[in-house]
Amino acid sequence: MGLLDRFGKLLSKNFQQTNTQFNRAIYNYLGQSVIFNPENDDTYINKGYRFNSTVYSIINLINKAACTIPLNVYEIKNENELKRYKSLTYGYQTSASLQKAQMIQKHALTELAHTDIHELLERPNPAQSYSAWIQEVISFGKLTGNRYIYGIKPDTGPNQSKFKELYVLPSQNVEINSGGIFDPIKSYTLDYNGQYHIEAADVCHIKDFNPYYDGTGSHLYGMSPLKAGLRALDTNNEAVTTGAKYLQNQTARGVLMSEEGDLNEVQAQQLKEKFRNTYAGSKNAGDIVITPKKLSWINFGMSASDLSLIEQYNASIKDLCNIYSVPVTLLNNTESSTYNNVVEAKKSLYQNCIMPELNKIRDELNRWLIPAYGDKLYLDFDYTNISELQEEMDKVVDQMSKSWWLTPNEKRQAMSYSVDADNEVLNNYYMPMNLMPLEEDMIVNENEEKSVDIDYNKFYKIKNEIRQDVFTTEEEAQKRANDLGCSGIHSHNTEDGMIYMPCKTHEEYIEITGEDVKGENDEMEIKPVKPGSAVERGLKNKVSEHNEKYGDNPTKKATYSMVQSVFNRGIGAYRNNPSSVRPSVTSEDQWAYARVNSFLYALRTGKYRGGKHDGDLFPSGHPLSSKKKNLITKQTYNNYPQGASNNAKRMLGWREKYGRDVVKGGTSVGWQRANQLANRENLSLSTVKRIHSFLSRHKENAKINPDFKGEPWRDRGYVAYNLWGGKSMVSWAKRISENE
């Protein structure tokens, strides 16, 4: 019975597919012996990497690019999302597919730090760093089609099942030992300065596809890419060898022929020496040749076949690059290189070569290495910092946001986000200008013309009544949430329809911004401008220029916090009432800067250019200040319990010890509050009331979630609660808030 017949029987409906029967079909002739590797891996290494500059350059290029991509450790939080993520990373990846994969990864995995896996990969063995180790893994794979990773475990102790060192075995010196039909790969033999037998469980064999099924197990070895490119490799080597011999002058360059009869041996030798002494060398280049006899020269230079060899050499370089999926442009090919060509070539290198190779290594390490460290762990390479693949992602997002003919659910589905099919708001269509739901009576029928009358004031009415940070789409609210540093969004049902705001709850929004949805001049906690940003630099320059001229007068002196408040209010005014903004103003920053300039004018002159604003921000004694003169200093408090300070210090210590990636509880305001409590700073009455309000709303987080009993720093709710002082702060904050 032939191989195909056995396959047919194996796959027939009446045949029970078991591992035993599969082995009998595939390994019918396999005995307990060494499986011969038909590939001469040593040849590929010697003829390729060691003596061929093209192959060396290709492998070196791949290694340099691959070593810059970090290998991270994650915790699996959603198995189904992980499957979706992996399905998008198996093959060729575009910018769009990579973006989708990254979005899904956020739902599937949580990055970890300071694990045993981190320590192992940072220093796989005493002689190698991670970069040197991964280079060996990749290089042997690209040369031989086989990658052998040998792991050493402790002989005794609690970590007996975990690897303490990882080594890359030289593929050309490794053989597979068979245990027979039912144990095709029993062990491996390293034949190098003696023979060493290694159990199969201690070796991770990552091989390339090999179609050579000969019944003896030859396909258990990977096939080298150079097997398919052997002719190109030989052509390349021969061309280089021939060129070197020609340049080394190992053959005669030509011959002198006498047209007046034969020269005797003495005459020929004299003529040869005269030519050599008189005209040879660079110093005689361009000199005039004078001969005593009539002679003719027959050139032995490069023939047509030699020139053809050069063409074959260039073609072989392209063939080798194609075999490795490396653009020939990156091998210092300047014939048609431009900036755009190089950028596209780098993108192609990552998409066609680097990422498939690393993903193959990733999957095998997760199969072989990770189970010893935990079922919920996952290794993955981080491609987010590859600039060549990031440049188009903004285009994809922008294109999707402008696709008004798609519902929010359809957009979310296209971007691989979850879909809420029961939410009618997410199933509506939205116009691009006003972002209002497109009702059925607004849709123009193909057979009738109908004008669409949209009430633009309807949208502005909602925004004015609800305050800033109010949106009619989830996408806008989520974008604003990202800017504020909170996660998720929440909604409010108004008489004019559903509106959306950043942060999961309204309480969290108030906590982060320090403001409610009441009005522009309500008391609010100033949100710092991003350090080092152009806005920060611009505002500080304005303060500096103002104070150089007017800073000596206390009633005219400006501060950065004062100007920043004016700027933030300008942003709020722009968002609250867009219809009042001058047509020439094109952005909220421009409007905010105009408000700052108006404020500084009023600060130095004592009069407004037009319209009164920000009177509460002028210094006391300024003619436009709305502050009461001789205002009694606001009451502050620093007699809060020491236990509250200790709770805050404990949270800050956890974050310093375990890192921000692990201790994720709390918002930016919460961590700011923890620093205040830890340093025992004075607290205003309004701050105390906020603390009381927060602790009252989140009292369920006073206890550690049982799921995080051994690692309380991973309990986000517990961390956030203690940033505000925890249990020790509750009674004191309540007493102060109710008595004042």
Image: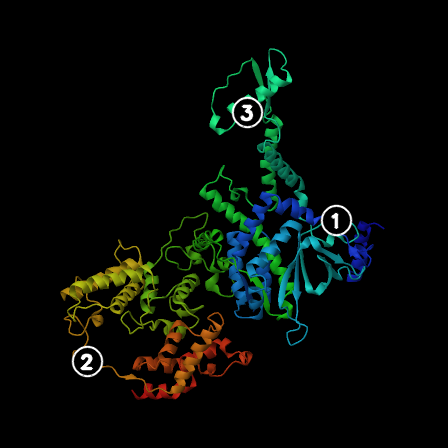
State whether residue 349 appears in this view: yes
Q: Pick whichever, 368 or 109, lies toward us.
A: 368
Q: At which x and y percent is residue 644?
A: 40, 84
Q: Secondary structure at mark 3?
A: helix
Three-letter code for the amino acid on which mark 1 is drawn: Pro
Image-based side of 558 in relation to 356, left or right? left
Seen at 33% across and 71% down, the residue is 517
Q: Say which residue label 3 marks.
A: 276
Front label number (3 vs 1)? 3
Q: Residues within 10 Å of mark 2 (few under 14, many from 20)?
A: few
Three-letter code for the amino acid on which mark 3 is drawn: Arg
Q: At which x and y percent is residue 421?
A: 52, 64
Image-based side of 66 in relation to 580, left or right? right
Q: Say which residue label 2 marks.
A: 631
Which image quadrant for residue 571?
Answer: bottom left
Q: Residues within 10 Å of mark 3 (few under 14, many from 20)?
A: few
Three-letter code for the amino acid on which mark 2 is drawn: Leu
Front label number (1 vs 2)? 1
